Structures are given as C-alpha cells and as structure tokens.
Image (cartoon, coloured by chain):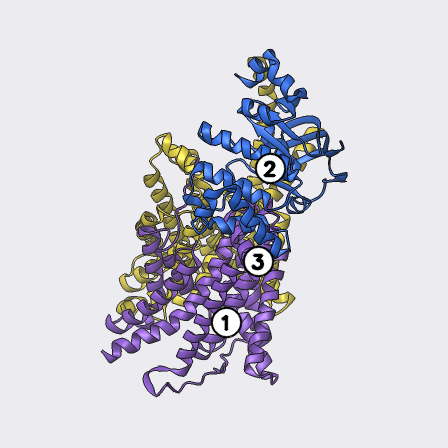
Chain colours: A blue, B purple, C yellow
C-alpha cells in the first residue's frame, strides 16, 4: 500500500519554544493510525502542524503533494478534515448548519444534501436535533456532530484530536465503533490522537508514541498494546 | 396624542438611520472585534460620491446602486490595505488606525467637495405621506428602504452559503478555517458590506441634515449607542436598538423641557454609559467570559 | 542556579549603569535645550513652544492612565476643557490669580475624573474607548448649555487676560508663560515618575498587566482604577488651564473630539506608557499640522492621517522605539571608547 501522508523532520515552535523535534512518520492509505503520549507531549501540535495552524519546518506530503506554504483552508480543500480538540462546534448555529459548514468546500448541492441524510443515518440523534442550536447538544452528541461535520468534507484523511475527551466510557466506545466503520466503509484514512490509549490501540493498525516532541516508539498497534514496559511508562494503564 | 404618535413615527424614521449605522458597526465588530470610529466618515464619503454622480446627471436610483457598489469595493480595499496587516496588533494601534482613516477621509472630502453644506435630493419627496400630516414621504421612504435592506440581509445570512460562511468565520475563526473557509476574505467581505450599509444610511439622512464633511459625527455616536443598546454581538439587536434610540431621542426632546437639540449628544453619551454599565452585553448580546 | 545568577549580575549591573548614564545625559541635554531655546526665537515661536509643553502635559496624563493602569481614553479633551473653563471662570469672574487657578482646575478635574472613572470601572478595551469617545463628542454641547451661559459665555466663550511676568522681570509675557509652563511641566513629570515608582504605581501596573491576577493578589482594583482616572484627569485639567491662559480664550468649539484625538495620537506617536515620549508626541501634534499645511493646504488632515499610518506600521512603539535605537547606538559608542 502507498503512503497517503508522509512526514519528515517535522519541527514546530510556539514563539521561541520548540515543541516538536524532528518527527518522522507516515500513514498508509486506508489505515487507522494512533498517536499516543502524555499531556504536552506534542500530539496536538503535530495535528496543528499538518494543517499549518502553527509555525513549523520540515516536509509534509499529502498524496505526494507538499503542504508547505499552503494555508489551512487550502489544506482542508485537499481532503484533510481536522476535528480539533474541544470539537470546534459552531454552538450558536443549528446542527444542520454545522453539517452544511462541513461541506463548505464542495460545490455539488445534490451530493451535499445526500450526505446530510447519510450523516443522519449514521447518527440518528443528530436528525432529531437538526434544528436545535448545536450548543444545546450533550458532549457526546457534539463529538458525533464534529465527526459528522468532518465527514461532510468527503475527506481522504481525518485527523481527530482527543475525541474521547470529557465523554462517558459508553459514549466513547460507540464513537470508536463508528470511527472503525467509517474507516472500513468510506475508506477514510484516520489519524487519531489520544490519551485514552486502550481504545485507540484497539481500532488502530499502526501506533506511534511520542514524548516531549520526539517519537519514542513506533509499530503495530497490537505490539504496542502488548508491550508492558511501554504501557506502564508512557500510556499509564 | 397626535404629537406623541407623530414623534414616535419621526423617531422610527431617524431610528432607521441609526439602525443602519449600528448594523455597519456591528458587521465590523463581529469580524474583527473592534469599533470602526471611521464608519461615519466612510458613510459621508459614499454620500458625496452619490451626490457627485447625481450632479453629473446620473438618475437617482442608478447613482444609488453605483454608490453601493463603489462603497462595497472601497470597504474591501480599506480592509486589505490598512486593517489586514494590523490583524494581530493591540487595541491602541487599531484605534489609531481608525483615527488615521477618519482624518484622511474627512480631509479628502473637504478638499474635493469643500465644507459648504449641500442639498441632497430625496427620491421620495417631502410631501405628507398618504395625505397624513404625521409623517413625510421621505421619512416613510427611510423606514421602507431600511426594512427592505434588513430583509435582504436576513435572507443573505440565513439562506446563502456565503452568509453561513461569514457567520462561521465571525463566531469561530479557527473552526471556520478547518472547514475550508477563507476567513480573511470573509472579514474583507464584512467590511465591504458595512461600508455599503453605511452608504445607505448616509444617502437617506443627507436630505434631512444636509451634506457636508462633518455631517455624520453625531449620527455615528447614535449608531454606537444603538449598537451598544442592542448588543454589539447581535445584528438583530443593533437594528432594534436603532429604532428604540430613535424613538427615545425624539420623545425626550419633545417632552422634557430644555432638552432639545441642545443636549442631543450628551443624551447619547448618557445612554451609552448607562447601557454599558447596567447591561454591558445589551439587550440581545451574549456574554463574554474572560479568563486569566 | 545561584552561580548563574552571580555571573549574570555584574554584566546586568554594568548594563544598567550605561543605560542610566545615557539617559541622564539625554535628560540634561533636553533640559538645557528647553531652557535656552526661547532666548533665540520670536514671540510667536515661543507661543508655539508653550503650547507644545501644554499638550505634552496632557499626553503625559494620558500616558499615566494607559501606561499606568492599562485603561485608555479617547475623551481627554473633556477634562482638558473642564480645566480650561475652571481656570478662565475663576480668573474672569472671581479675579483669582492665574497661578492659583491651576490647583483649582486640578481639583475639579480630579473629582470629575473619579466620577467618570466609577462607571468606567466596569468597562475595558473597546467599551472604554467608546464611552470616552462619547464623552469627548458630547462635551462641546455641554459647554454651550444655556443654563451656564452667564458663567461660560455660551457659544462665544470667554476671553482671558494674559498675565505679566512677576517681580518686574524684564521679559515678555510670552516668554514668562513659557518658563512658567516649563516649570509646571517639570513638576508634573517628576510627580508622574514618582507615582509610577511608588506602591500605588506598582499596583496600577499590576492591573495593566493582568487585571484578574492583580485582584487575586489583593490589589484593590476599583480604588486604583478610579484613582488612575482621577489623577490623569487632574493633570489634564492643569494642561487645559495652562492652555486657556496661554491662548487667552476658551470656547466650546476649541475642545472637540479633534483635541481628544490629537492627545491620543500624541501618546501613540510618543510611545505608549513612556513619559519622555510625551514631548515627542506633543511635537507631532503641534508642528506636523503646520508642516502638513505647507505640503498641501486643505489636505493637512490627510497628511496627518498618512503620517500616523506610517508611524503605526514602521515604528509601532513610537518615539520610544526610536529612543531605544539611539540608546543602543550610544551604548556601542561608549563601549568602544
């Protein structure tokens, strides 16, 4: 299989502080990959660097095309959907408007309408609340909405930043089941950043563990999950 | 009673102008979190452009539409040249930028068209409206044009994709970028629309206050008062605020002795300070929580 | 850790000494120039220099507010006007000596500043800008009010008698007023420096840097913010009073929003929060309009605005930035010798 996203020597900075020290990894087309690590290890920074939301150097290639010098919105147009930490819900708009916003880069109004219906099939709760302000949804529903909004882009790659954050365990399990289904049925490549390592490892093929801006471990997700040392020292379970 | 109704109607007519100015102020506030102190001067300049076109023999309504188009483009150019580069500058720098703009526009208008007051035509005339002494045709026209404008804006923001994108960019710029919206251009578009809305206010009020470079000073202050009353984060509130302030101003002037035109501006001051202190988010605004 | 500090300390101390000596030299040079210049120029130029000092006081007062407590005001013209009218009314209606009208103006403006500062307590950023903008816009109408006309002279305003030099000094009225204004300027400058270095000043600056954190540290926010407004208004009032005496005339249309804008610009150009910059900022607002008028009559506002944009983009920290370049150069020079 070919690589959809290749990252070489990625360094990122917040002001004077260097947050990433030369990351190197790649995502296979159609895979689910997870990026694990403690708070402040640089997981979120990595996702933000991919979408050029912070200053970074190094090579990032998406489907062979270099992303350097492209604005965030242009990168999104290439088919990279980013579900940010905190979900980025447009709380004062309706659920339906949030979905429409996800399809902002598309021009096919027929296809958009079909996709909205498809999302409602995926997430029936959202159909019930389509006319409500998104801010009135529960945390789990907002996370579903964020994933649905990202899918409205018809992305090739989906970046998820701590999707389990602040959600009840049952809701998290549902969410990861849906992510696995999206990957399988819609052929969307997924990169998910998590502190909740156990679930992420269960759906992922590849796993990377990062610490203070460096990759300290890479391999098959199952191998990482089975490695007791790694689990104890980096993943905390 | 007739006096009362008359004053309320007159208040709604001037309130329509305040509503437009407030709307223009709110459009820019939503986009960049700053108050455009040069909004009044921009509106005045647009009105002079309309006047010039009419002087050259262009029919009123064509001049009206042309002026809107020119103002729209002008607003975008101002944003691109002056305020885009200042996007991350502190508030003092922004205020200085608005003031520079204010000084430049005022001075260029004075040089081009001088400071003598000019008649500006009303397309509605000033006959009694429908034979009633309560309100003139021009006042009715002011209200009518404003309502049409509001309906169009409502439709634009509610039902078009670009309107949706503008709302998204204003409420959460980062999330908007992540769905592929070019937030920078949405801000520029907001400036263009604010500039055009201001132009409408200028062209509607010019037949009443006469056209000259300083004509918008007091009106802008009332526009600010309206925007604050309605809530700076709510375009709908700004419009309601405009009408309320217009009615309030007229009634106070009529029924409280000694408070006529003489105290017009101090009343606006009192209104602004009172609203800001008592209800800082206005009638329809949302609260902003500040953290360390 | 401690070893690092020890090695760093002497170098830092040396830096401070050089810095001090550079700024002391600069201060002495400026003072000498201020003392000597009127001896060599015409009366009209002396008058302009005096107005330059008057506006410098007003800008300093705004700097104290903004640099001190982080609040800012587009409404300083209102306090300036209040000071001017207080002084003029006392001189013309009550025959009070002009020197004594200054503390009176300061007191009146302090009270007004505190009264306006109280509601302003709840405002910040654009809201404060808006409220003070409204204050400045409304002020001329308040001054024109019929009720006060017997005192204020209404639209016509009041003419103020120009004071002579005291003790039969053989200098012109203009020159005397210049030195008098210079003395007041120096006193206010010293007072401002001391204030910023005092406990009160530190409390104000804590507010400027982070309001919520400052209040968590036990700084009495309402007290200090109101106080900052009051002191700033008092100094502005003194500037207004001096301005009235120098111009010999007060009228409502002399104190419009344009004046407030000029004072605000003076602060931006001089460098926000940097007291010596007030002189540079004042020079900008007093002399640049003249220059602008020479470049193109009628376009002076546009030239003024364009210059301001240049300042914003090229030297956003105003004269302070220029002074720091100068200081860096001087330091290099001193080190090499």
| Residues at circles 3 and 1 in contact by the CB criterion of under 8 Å | no
Cα gap from disc 3 to disc 1, whole angstroms: 22 Å
**Residue highlighted by disc 2:** A182
**Residue at (59% x, 23% y) in the render:** A201
What x and y, as percent, mark residue B246? 35, 69
Q: Few, some or many C-alpha atoms within 10 Å of disc 2 (few <14, some 14-19, many ≥20)?
A: some
Of circles 1 and 2, which is in front?
Answer: 2
Mark 3 to mark 2: distance in Å?
A: 29 Å
Give the residue pinned by disc 3. B162
- Picture quadrant where residue C292 is located: bottom right
Is residue B214 in sight in this rendering? no
Q: What SS does tag 3 mark?
A: helix
**From what the image shows, is residue A212 above or below residue B211?**
above
Whether residue C301 sits left or right of residue C202 in the image: it is: right
Question: Who is closer to the viewer here, C99 or B169?
Answer: B169
Residue contact between numbered discs 1 and 2, judged by CB atoms under 8 Å: no
Query: Which is closer to the viewer, label 3 or label 2?
Result: 2
Q: Does mark 1 fall on the same chain as mark 3?
A: yes
Residue located 35% across and 63% down the image: B268
What percent of the width, then of the height, locates residue B181? 60, 50
Which of the 4 quarters of the picture holds residue C140? Answer: bottom left
């Amino acid at each position: 299989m070919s690589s959809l996203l290749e990252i070489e020597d990625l360094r990122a900075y917040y002001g004077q502080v260097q947050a990433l020290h030369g990351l190197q990894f790649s995502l296979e087309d159609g895979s689910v990959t997870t990026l694990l690590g403690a708070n402040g290890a640089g997981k979120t920074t990595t996702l933000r660097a991919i979408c050029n939301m912070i200053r970074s150097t190094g090579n990032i290639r998406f489907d062979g095309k270099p992303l350097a010098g492209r604005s965030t919105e242009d990168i999104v147009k290439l088919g990279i959907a980013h579900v940010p930490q905190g979900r980025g819900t447009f709380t004062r708009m309706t659920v339906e408007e949030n979905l429409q916003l996800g399809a902002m880069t598309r021009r096919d109004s027929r296809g958009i309408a079909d996709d909205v219906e498809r999302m409602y099939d995926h997430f029936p709760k959202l159909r019930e609340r389509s006319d409500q302000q998104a801010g009135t949804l529960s945390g789990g529903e907002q996370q579903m909405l964020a994933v649905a909004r990202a899918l409205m882009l018809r992305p090739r790659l989906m970046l998820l930043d701590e999707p389990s954050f602040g959600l009840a365990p049952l809701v998290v399990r549902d969410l990861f089941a849906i992510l696995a289904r999206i990957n399988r049925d819609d052929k969307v490549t997924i990169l998910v950043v998590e502190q909740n390592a156990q679930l992420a490892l269960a759906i992922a093929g590849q796993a990377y563990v990062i610490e203070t801006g460096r990759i300290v471990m890479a391999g098959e997700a199952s191998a990482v999950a089975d490695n007791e040392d790694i689990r104890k020292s980096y993943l905390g379970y | 009673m007739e006096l009362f109704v008359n004053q309320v109607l007159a208040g709604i007519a001037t309130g329509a102008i305040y509503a437009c100015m407030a709307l223009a102020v709110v459009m820019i506030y939503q986009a960049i979190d700053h108050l455009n102190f040069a909004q009044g001067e921009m509106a005045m300049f647009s009105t002079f452009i309309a006047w010039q076109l009419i002087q050259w023999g262009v029919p009123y309504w064509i001049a009206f539409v042309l002026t809107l188009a020119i103002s729209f483009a002008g607003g975008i150019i101002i944003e691109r040249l002056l305020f885009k580069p200042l996007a991350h500058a502190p508030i003092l720098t922004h205020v200085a930028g608005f003031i520079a703009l204010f000084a430049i526009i005022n001075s260029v208008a004075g040089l081009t068209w001088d400071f003598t007051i000019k008649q500006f035509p009303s397309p509605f005339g000033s006959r009694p409206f429908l034979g009633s002494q309560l309100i003139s045709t021009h006042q009715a026209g002011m209200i009518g044009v404003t309502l049409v404008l509001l309906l169009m804006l409502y439709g634009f923001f509610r039902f078009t994709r670009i309107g949706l994108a503008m709302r998204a960019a204003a409420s959460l710029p980062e999330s908007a970028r992540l769905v592929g919206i070019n937030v920078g251009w949405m801000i520029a578009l907001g400036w263009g629309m604010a500039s055009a809305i201001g132009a409408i206010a200028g062209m509607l009020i010019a037949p009443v206050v006469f056209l000259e470079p300083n004509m918008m000073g007091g009106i802008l202050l009332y526009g600010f008062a309206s925007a604050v009353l309605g809530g700076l984060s709510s375009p709908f509130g700004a419009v309601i605020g405009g009408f309320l302030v217009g009615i309030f101003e007229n009634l106070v002037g009529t029924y409280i002795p000694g408070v006529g035109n003489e105290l017009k501006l101090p009343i606006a001051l009192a209104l602004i300070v009172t609203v800001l202190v008592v209800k800082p988010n206005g009638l329809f605004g949302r609260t902003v929580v500040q953290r360390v | 850790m401690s070893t690092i500090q020890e090695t760093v300390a002497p170098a830092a101390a040396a830096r401070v000494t050089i810095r001090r000596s550079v700024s002391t030299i600069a201060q002495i040079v400026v003072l000498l120039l201020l003392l000597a210049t009127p001896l060599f120029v015409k009366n009209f130029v002396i008058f302009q220099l005096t107005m330059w000092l008057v506006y410098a006081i007003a800008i300093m007062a705004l700097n104290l507010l903004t640099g001190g407590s982080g609040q800012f005001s587009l409404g300083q013209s209102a306090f300036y006007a209040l000071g001017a009218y207080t002084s003029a009314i006392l001189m013309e209606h009550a025959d009070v000596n002009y020197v004594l009208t200054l503390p009176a103006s300061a007191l009146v403006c302090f009270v007004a500043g505190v009264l306006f500062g109280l509601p302003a307590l709840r405002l910040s950023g654009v809201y404060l800008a808006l409220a003070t903008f409204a204050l400045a816009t409304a002020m001329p109408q308040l001054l024109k009010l019929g009720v006060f006309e017997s005192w204020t002279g209404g639209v016509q305003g009041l003419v103020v008698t120009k004071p002579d030099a005291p003790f039969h000094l053989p200098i012109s009225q203009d020159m005397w007023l210049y030195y008098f204004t210079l003395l007041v300027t120096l006193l206010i400058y010293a007072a401002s420096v001391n204030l910023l270095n005092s406990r009160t000043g530190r409390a104000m600056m804590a507010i400027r840097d982070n309001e919520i954190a400052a209040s968590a540290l036990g700084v009495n926010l309402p007290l200090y913010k109101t106080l900052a407004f009051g002191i700033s208004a008092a100094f502005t009032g003194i500037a207004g009073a001096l301005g009235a005496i120098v111009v010999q005339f007060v009228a409502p249309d002399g104190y419009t929003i344009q004046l407030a804008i000029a004072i605000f610009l003076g602060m931006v150009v001089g460098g926000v929060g940097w007291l010596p910059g007030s002189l540079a900022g004042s020079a900008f607002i007093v002399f640049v309009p003249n220059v602008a008028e020479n470049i193109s009559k009628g376009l002076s506002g546009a030239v003024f605005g364009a210059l301001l944009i240049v300042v914003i983009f090229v030297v956003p920290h105003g004269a302070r930035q220029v002074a720091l370049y100068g200081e860096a150069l001087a330091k290099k020079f001193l080190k090499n010798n």
